[in-house]
Image: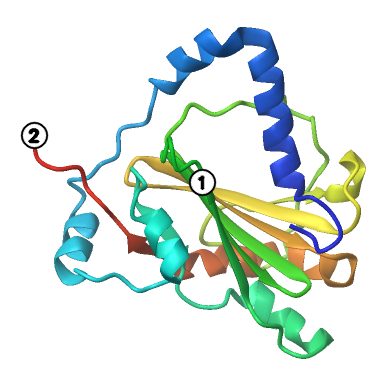
Amino acid sequence: MSRTGVSFQAARLASALGACAVAVGAASLAVAADKLIEVEWSDPEIKSFVAANPQPRSLGATADDQLSKLKLPVLAFEDTPGVAEKTFHLGPRPAVERDVVMDDDNPVWYQLVERYGDITVSVSGDLRVQHEFAPGAFPIYEKPATPGAAPQTGPTVSVFDDRAEGGEEGYLAEYTIMKFGVPYTVTVECTDLAKDQCRDTTLISKDSELLKLVRATPPAPQ
């Protein structure tokens, strides 16, 4: 979420949901809501986490209360992403602002948003069937490979020009990883001052190593 406008990612999601509601109606949406991804709750990482963390790291009283209701494991950055650290030379280190976005009545998705001044980083997970955007709908900029450079490890990062679709400033970088059978998407939004950081796909990809399980509430045994 840029400081001067609504998040490009949120705008795309709102547009997709609005179009879906008009096209298929409430009845069809109710059917789609039943098609949820099955979480791999038996994954050893989840079992170890639950056994070792009877009181998981707190993200704040309000956030903890919300996240405890989710029907999917919660991933978050355990430390400040490197792509955000690089922007702190632009001014004083900003106080981190964190928001949790989810549907308390249908807790099958979440978005954890952290703002670091000129950089906003969000992590989202969703058990619902997702809308697919047509290829070429948004301009994507790939960082050219440097001759002789080692192959990039980690997820592939795509960079979008926010302004090309009506965004007010800057760029977006985005990648998706699969954990526990669930797709998790990380979005980095950069103001115009920090747009070069959104183009640093190598660092953004490496930052994925900081994504850790911070909350898991397996369903009660049947």
Task: Give the residue drawn at x 42%, y 55%.
Answer: 66
Q: Which residue is mark 2?
A: 222
Please report the residue visible at 55 percent of the width from the left and 69 percent of the height from the top: 207
Q: Is residue 199 visible?
A: no
The reply, left or right, for residue 122 in relation to residue 194 is: left
Dot 2, how many residues are within 10 Å of its Cα: few (below 14), some (14-19), or many (20+)? few
Q: Classify residue 140 by image quadrant.
A: top right
Give above or below for 121 relative to 58: above
Check disc 2 and give the amino acid type.
Gln
Q: Classify mark 1: residues with Cα within 10 Å, few (<14), some (14-19) or many (20+).
A: some
First-in-chain label (1 vs 2): 1
Amino acid type, label 1: Met
The C terminus - image quarter: top left
Pick the quarter of the image with the N terminus. bottom right
Looking at the image, which is closer to me, 203 or 186? 186
Q: Can you say whether 216 is above or below 31 in the image? A: below
Query: Residue 6 or 77: which is nearer the viewer?
Result: 6
- What residue is shown with label 1? 102
Q: Which mark is residue 35?
A: none
Q: From the viewer's perspective, is residue 140 above or below residue 55? A: above
SS of the residue at dot 2? loop
Question: Residue 169: x, y in percent?
Answer: 90, 57
Q: CA distance from mark 1 to mark 2?
A: 26 Å
